[in-house]
Image (cartoon, grey):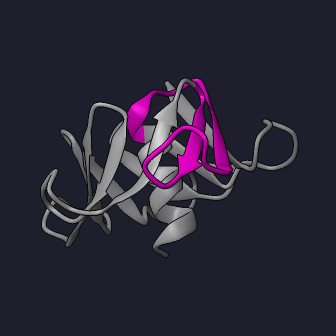
Amino acid sequence: MSSKAYRGSSTWGEAILIVDGTRVHPGSTSWAESVMTISGSQIVRGSTLWGEVLVTVEGDSIHRGSSAWGEVIATIDGDRVCRGNSTWGETIATIEGGGRMTGAAAAVYLLMM
């Protein structure tokens, strides 16, 4: 089952990402080449697990880099992804049909790529 991420605070419009298993594809179809791979609580750049670790997810916090000691770039609040270390921040993405890792992929795509 795939999940989708949308820019902003609603699921209107075209999806910015599709997460199909562990592969993250830009756009609204899974036909595009993978730009990120989910590995446990981490998201890695590229289509293999050997890429650079972009973020680590711990609870609802999305940390830059390969550990939970990194800067919090976004926070997950249900189906919303908020900029920064609080759910009071700007809603940068809304997820549909997915969980924390779809939200983390959306944060990486919007804030780091």
Residue at the (14%, 56%) spot, across then down = 69
Say which of 100 and 29 sits in front. 100
Residue interval drawn in magenta? 79-101
The correct choice, above or below, for 33 with respect to 80 in the image is below
Say which of 97 and 68 sits in front. 68
Locate residue 92, reporting x and y percent. 65, 52
Is 99 on the left or on the right of 30, as rendered?
A: left
Is 80 on the left or on the right of 70, as rendered?
A: right
Image quadrant assignment for residue 47: bottom left
> Exactly how many numbered labels are in the figure?
0
Is 61 on the left or on the right of 49, as rendered?
A: right
Say which of 79 and 75 sits in front. 75
Is 92 magenta? The answer is: yes
Image quadrant assignment for residue 36: bottom left
Image quadrant assignment for residue 3: top right
Is 109 magenta? The answer is: no
Is 90 on the left or on the right of 56, as rendered?
A: right
Locate residue 88, reporting x and y percent. 60, 41
Locate residue 72, reporting x and y percent. 34, 56
Locate residue 111, reporting x and y percent. 52, 68
Residue at the (87%, 46%) spot, across then down = 13
Residue at the (54%, 37%) spot, across then down = 87
Residue at the (43%, 66%) spot, across then down = 35
